[in-house]
Amino acid sequence: MASMFLFRLVEFRNKSKQFADRTKFVRRFRIVAFTNYNNQWFFFLVFCLTSSLIYFTLYAKLYWGGVFLTVILTYALYHIILIGWEKIKYTGSFEWIIRTIANNLIPARKDRFKEGTKWW
């Protein structure tokens, strides 16, 4: 309810463009949420890298500094991947596959969207 109230205030005050620019980082993760959920293994790659840099061994127990470093590096990796994926219009993501199948199987959906319409 609080988030809907926030969105209502943003729209009511006609600040949607500024709000959209400031929340672009969070909204990138939302667009392909199912794909991000299935790509959780990126965390283990970053954890392996962080553990190797700190203790020179794979998968060692990390203290708080290592945990925060792992989380920050994981978000940075996801952010870089999502920026690159945005450039190719999220081609190959689960959401893209579902939308492509739905648009080709259901004739009413195909007629509703013009050729150049963004699916996201």
Image (tube, rainbow, N blue to C red):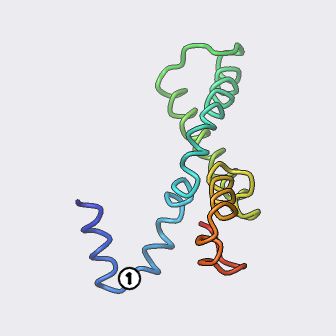
Identify whether 11 is placed above or below 110. below
Q: Amino acid at mark 1?
A: Lys
Q: Quadrant of residue 45?
A: top right
Q: Position of residue 117 (x, y in %)?
A: 66, 77
Q: Quadrant of residue 50?
A: top right
Q: Residues within 10 Å of mark 1 (few under 14, many from 20)?
A: few
Of the 4 image quadrants, the one containing the N terminus is bottom left
Count of numbered circles on the image: 1
The residue at 59%/72% (across/down) is 108
Q: Quadrant of residue 18?
A: bottom left
Q: Which residue is mark 1?
A: 15
The residue at 65%/72% (across/down) is 110
Q: Position of residue 16 (x, y in %)?
A: 41, 79
Of the 4 image quadrants, the one containing the C terminus is bottom right
Disc 1, SS: loop
Identify whether 104 is placed above or below 63. below
Which residue is more in the foreground, 8 or 78? 8
Q: Position of residue 22 (x, y in %)?
A: 47, 69
The residue at 71%/64% (across/down) is 89
Identify whether 22 is placed above or below 74. below
Which residue is more in the foreground, 5 or 19? 5
Identify whether 112 is placed above or below 88. below
Q: Position of residue 48 (x, y in %)?
A: 68, 23
Which residue is more in the foreground, 28 or 34? 34
The residue at 63%/46% (across/down) is 78
